[in-house]
Amino acid sequence: MARQFSEVLEGVSAEQAASYPVAGAHSIWELVLHLCGTYGLVLRRLGGDGRQLTESEDWPSVPEPSAENWSDSIRVLKQLNEDLRHALKSFPGERLDQPLVPEASYTAYTQFIGISQHNLYHAGQMVLLKKALGA
């Protein structure tokens, strides 16, 4: 998994991940599931599928808070990160200035930079939530 997420999520329990230490903010767990959805979106686009995420794909419901469910969510995030890393390694450089799918109004390069920026943004949110939790 991307180093920023491994470090940020280290020591966060299922109960902490599901809690809302900042009023009006998402929980750490919600952010993890959202990141899974956006990884899935980019992987889908790499496969030629231009559909947008549905609301439930973009912000899935958090399962019952348990250590097992939290571990499963982290495992899925790690796997999707690894899947995307492998897909990007084999992506042809000459296609970076072309859209991934016809529906996209931006290039593959913009998509790849965008997912990195998106991940870092949410990693920062998780750091702030973790601090608010005292974790």
Image: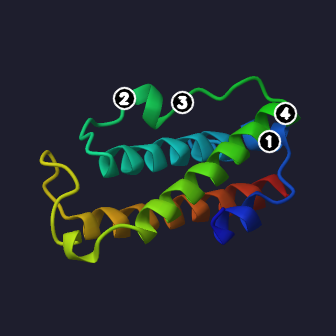
Q: Which residue is mark 1?
A: 71
Tell me the kind of residue under disc 1: Ser
- Mark 4 neighbour density, 10 Å: few (under 14) some (14–19) many (20 or more): few
Q: Earlier in the sequence, mark 1 or mark 2?
A: 2
Camera-near label (1 vs 3) is 1
Q: Is residue 58 visible?
A: yes
| Quadrant in which residue 128 is drawn | bottom right
Q: Secondary structure at mark 1?
A: helix
Q: Residue furthest top?
A: 64
Tell whether label 1 touches label 4 (CB within 8 Å).
yes
**Residue at left offset 59%, top offset 59%:** 82
Q: Closest to the observer: 89 or 33?
A: 89
* In the image: residue 81, left or right of residue 42: right
**Residue at left offset 48%, top offset 41%:** 37
Picture coordinates of residue 35, whole percent (x, y): 53, 48
Q: Which mark is residue 112?
A: none
- Mark 1 neighbour density, 10 Å: few (under 14) some (14–19) many (20 or more): few
Picture coordinates of residue 109, whole percent (x, y): 27, 70
Q: Which mark is residue 68?
A: 4
Q: Secondary structure at mark 2?
A: loop
Q: Which mark is residue 54?
A: 2
Vertical side of 10 occupied by 59: above or below: above
Q: Which mark is residue 60?
A: 3
Vertical side of 129 occupied by 103: above or below: above
* In the image: residue 122, left or right of residue 115: right
Q: Closest to the observer: 90 or 61?
A: 90
- Distance of label 1 from label 3 (alpha carbons): 16 Å
Picture coordinates of residue 21, whole percent (x, y): 72, 45
